[in-house]
Image (cartoon, rainbow, N blue to C red):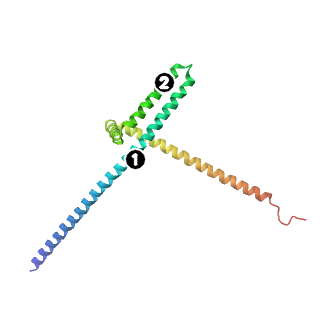
Amino acid sequence: MGQQNTNRQQDNGNEDWDALKGDVGDIAGVAVERSRHFIDSAREQATDYVDRRKDDVAQSVADFATSLRESTHSFDERPNIRAVVDTAAEGLEQLADSIRDRTFADFFNEFEDVVRRRPATVAAVSVAVGFLAARFIKSTAEDLRYDSVHAGQAQSRQTRARQAQRPRAGTGA
């Protein structure tokens, strides 16, 4: 009789464990599906935003190319320099057209292809960009710290000067 109770408890324990595993599996499946939906939604929103902004970027590049081309008038007596600047302006105009004609997905796929073909180059560029960003942040922080220290010193000098200018009590007529 005692053995039957033990077997029944083990069966109940296994059934409970199986039910719990099934529930956890169902919850995980729902979570995965919701995360996929969230990622797809975020990707769509990012793509829409970039597609709207790409025309602005293309126009900025085209405006810069126009400004560059207009600046070549000062190089009339130096045709070699003017040719280089004209070539750069032409390249920028082609870039602006390319930006207008392509979608965010096209840019992303091209970037992904570059990363796959040249991972070492991408890693080196990432390290360089990170280094430059760190130097910029450090420099900015040092400038802010320098400005705040000197502002504090100037304020304490002004306070001492005001105190020195006040008439002293008890020295009157």
Disc 2 or disc 1, which is closer to the eye? 1
Q: Position of residue 51 (x, y in %)?
A: 39, 43
Q: Position of residue 61 (x, y in %)?
A: 46, 35
Quadrant of image for the C terminus: bottom right
Disc ID at residue 38:
none
Amino acid type, callout 2: Val
Q: Identify residue for label 2.
A: 84
Q: Quadrant of residue 2?
A: bottom left
Image position of 68 (left or right of 95): right
Residue 76 higher or lower than 46, as above or below: above
Outermost residue toward the bottom in this view: 1
Q: Foreground residue, 116 or 33?
A: 33
Cα separation between marks 2 and 1: 35 Å
Outermost residue toward the right in this view: 173
The mark that comes first in sequence, 2 or 1, is 1
Label 1: which secondary element: helix
Amino acid type, callout 1: Tyr
Q: Residues within 10 Å of mark 2 (few under 14, many from 20)?
A: few
Q: Residue at x 39, y 34 (%)?
A: 98
Q: Residue at x 74, y 57 (%)?
A: 160
Q: Identify residue for label 1.
A: 49
